[in-house]
Amino acid sequence: MKYSSKLGSFAEDLFVELFCDTFGSEKSQYLFIQYPFTDIYGNRRYIDFALESDELKIAIEIDGERFHNPAKVSSNKYYDDLMKQNSLIYNNWKVYRWVYSQLKHQSEKVKDELRTFVGEMPAFRMMDYYLPQQKGKIIELKKHQQSALENLQAMRANGESIALF
């Protein structure tokens, strides 16, 4: 993961910062952000952060007070959060959750818990492992196609932005 912009919330940004402090920024390449999974009812869901190896699947959820605090959300939302976590556990994920105030005010404790829960970073898959793999044959361009691409490149190099093929 390249950390160059906001992920979507202050809490998620802070988590990445603590993760990098704990394991080193080079280990952030193993964090998969908004990892898709299917719950027990067939609904598509997303894990805030996932780490995955052949033997271990770790789901990390960062809960904002506004969206996950049982006292501040509807009972349906709260039950849905529980069902999401139960679906993850059913599918052999280890689930760890923190709230923003823990990340902000108890950062050393959170880093200790990360070391305990994740360990010494076993061989997790890198994020680009999940990108679609190219399949099929290599396309050989015909002479006129190659010439057209070269002309387009030359036009762009000269600052021209409109071309007609």
Image (cartoon, rainbow, N blue to C red):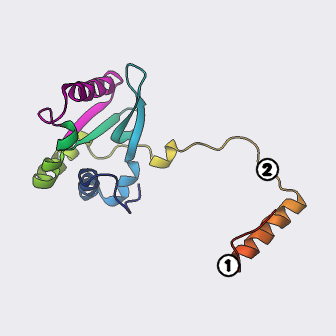
Q: Which residues are magenta?
A: 69-98
**Left or right position of 71 against 67:** left
Kind of residue at badge 2: Ile
Residue 104 horizontal/vertical position (percent): 14, 54
Residue at figure coordinates x 36%, y 41% from the top left: 51
x then y, percent, for residue 137: 76, 44
Look at 43% across and 21% down and name the residue there. Answer: 42
Which mark's residue is nearer the viewer, 1 or 2? 1
Q: Where residue 44 sits in the image (x, y, percent)? A: 42, 30
Please state if 55 lies on the left or on the right of 23 as rendered.
right
Q: Is residue 109 left or right of residue 48?
A: left
Tell me where residue 82 appears, x and y as whole percent.
Answer: 24, 26
Q: CA distance from mark 1 to mark 2?
A: 28 Å
Any magenta on residue 36?
Answer: no
Residue position marked by numbered label 2 in the rendering: 139
Query: Which residue lies most toward the top here?
Result: 41
Q: Which residue is mark 1?
A: 159
Does residue 37 sit above or below 2 in this rendering?
above
SS assignment at label 2: loop
Q: Quadrant of the C terminus?
A: bottom right
Mark 2 nearby-residue class (10 Å; few <14, some 14–19, many ≥20): few
| SS category of the residue bearing label 1 | loop
Decide: is 122 above or below 104: above
> Magenta span has 87?
yes
Which residue type carries mark 1?
Gly
> Quarter of the image containing the N terminus?
bottom left
Asked where in the image residue 56 lies, by quadrant, the reply is: top left
Q: Which sits earlier in the primary sequence, circle 1 or circle 2?
A: 2
Between 141 and 122, the one nearer to me in the picture: 141
What's the mark number on residue 85? none
